[in-house]
Image: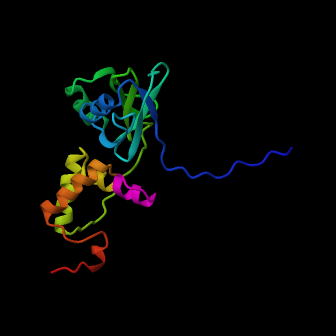
Amino acid sequence: MASTAPPIVECEQQHAGLRVTDVRAAVDFYTTKLGFRPGFTWGDPPTFAGVNLGSVQMFLQQGTPAPAGCEVYFRVGNADELFEFQRASGVEIVVPPGDREYGLRDYSVRDLDGYELCFGHHIFNSGPPIRIERVDVPVRLEKRLAGLLRDLAAHKRMSLASCLEETLLHTLDGVGPHTSADLRYIETLKRTHGIDYDSHGSYRFTEE
């Protein structure tokens, strides 16, 4: 019998599921100690629940925990920030944060039922140096936008030029360089600097 090619499958989400001793206690631990948000609970007392980290939902189901050989990895925007929150909440640290050879900075903790959970973010400056030559390019920006850019560069601990280069390179690839936390901060900066136009505003800029 001739083999057939597998179908092209579109899958935008996956849900890890863990069996836990006490669903209610697990939900409380994940939401108060680990930084997850409540999703849903089913049953009274609950035997099934979902907790959210960003756009990712994880299922917690009543049953016999089996943490041996099980690890769940979450890629987040800022692993160090989340680590500080979890450490201050008294979560058991398995592996402290560190830069790994696979291009991520991550750490591991353990939950109430012994499951190991890893949280990490990409290290964008990993890899061999790229030798370049910089040239001066005359750039004039709208005053409020320039103020936002300076503040954003300082927030990301980058020079103004590096922040512009990062934004331009990501734009050329059709993706954004900013994490969800960065975007929330940018919204704050927009209000601070009084930016009342959207991304198409530049088409209508006129100088006084």
x 38%, y 20%: residue: 114
The image shows residue 1, relative to residue 95, as above or below, that is below
Q: Position of residue 58 (x, y in %)?
A: 41, 38
Q: How many marks?
A: 0
164 vs 54, nearest the viewer: 54
Q: Quadrant of the C terminus?
A: bottom left
x 36%, y 30%: residue: 106
Residue 148 picture quarter: bottom left
Q: Residue 31 magenta-drawn?
A: no
| Left/right of residue 85 with respect to residue 23 in the rendered view | left
Q: Residue 176 magenta-drawn?
A: yes
Q: Position of residue 94 (x, y in %)?
A: 35, 20
| Left/right of residue 112 with respect to residue 4 in the rendered view | left
Q: Quadrant of the N terminus?
A: top right
Residue 22 picture quarter: top left
203 vs 128, nearest the viewer: 203
| Left/right of residue 146 with respect to residue 135 in the rendered view | left
Residue 83 picture quarter: top left
x 24%, y 33%: residue: 32
x 38%, y 47%: residue: 55
Q: Residue furthest front?
A: 44
Q: Residue furthest right?
A: 1
| Left/right of residue 100 with respect to residue 30 in the rendered view | right
Q: Position of residue 67 (x, y in %)?
A: 45, 21
The image shows residue 172, relative to residue 177, as above or below, that is below
Residue range corresponding to the magenta coloring: 166-177
Q: Position of residue 99 (x, y in %)?
A: 37, 29
